[in-house]
Amino acid sequence: MSKLESSKSEINTNMSLVEMKGNAVRQLKRLTLEERNFAISEIEKFIVNSGKPSLLMLLSNELRYYTSFKVKNNDLTKAATAIVEFIETEEFFINLGELKLVDDGESHLEIWVGDKFFALFNYDPFIVEI
C-alpha cells in the first residue's frame, strides 16, 4: 500500500450536499425548450416507475412549502407537463427564480427552482384511510 492510498484527507466545507448542489445550480441558465421537454419526460418516467401513484407531493423542507398533486389524468405526459407548468406559472415559484433542473434522487425527483431544492415523490403511502 502506498502512502497515497493509506492517507485520507477531508475538506470540511460546513455545507450540506443540498447546499453545495444549490450553489452549482445557481450557475445554470434557464432550461432550453429541449431541456424542458426532457424534464417533462423525467417526471413522466418517475410517475411510471413509482407505480403510477394517484398523489404526488412537491416538498421543500427548507422553505416549509408543499403542494399535493392528484394525478387524475391517464395521459402521463399531460400530467408531467401540468406539474412543470404549475412551477412556471405559480407566483411562489416565479419569485424563487426559474426552473433550473430536474434530477433523479433515490426515491424522489430533485426539482430545482432558482437555487432551491424541492423533492417530488409518491405521496400515496402517506395517506391513511379511516
Image (spheres, rainbow, N blue to C red):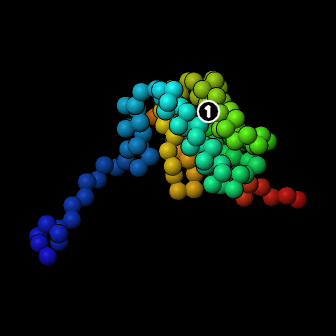
Q: Quadrant of the N terminus?
A: bottom left
Density class for disc 1 (Cα within 10 Å; few <14, some 14-19, many ≥20) is some
Q: Quadrant of residue 2?
A: bottom left
| Residue 71 position in % (x across, y down) | 75, 43
Q: Secondary structure at mark 1?
A: helix
Identify the residue shown where x is 42% and y is 39%: 22
**Image vertical order of residue 71 relative to residue 9, above or below:** above
Residue 39 versus residue 19: which sits nearer the camera?
39
- The residue where tag 1 is placed is 84
Identify the residue shown where x is 60% and y is 43%: 43
Q: Which residue sits furthest right?
A: 130
Residue 101 versus residue 127: which sits nearer the camera?
101
| Residue 111 position in % (x across, y down) | 54, 40
Q: Quadrant of residue 81?
A: top right
Residue type marked 1: Val
Residue 114 versus residue 107: which sits nearer the camera?
107
| Residue 91 position in % (x across, y down) | 63, 23
Whether residue 98 is visible, yes or no, is no
Identify the residue shown where x is 70% and y is 35%: 78
Identify the residue shown where x is 56% and y is 43%: 42
Q: Which residue sits furthest bottom?
A: 1
| Position of residue 31 in the picture relative to residue 124 (left or right) | left
Q: Quadrant of the C terminus?
A: bottom right
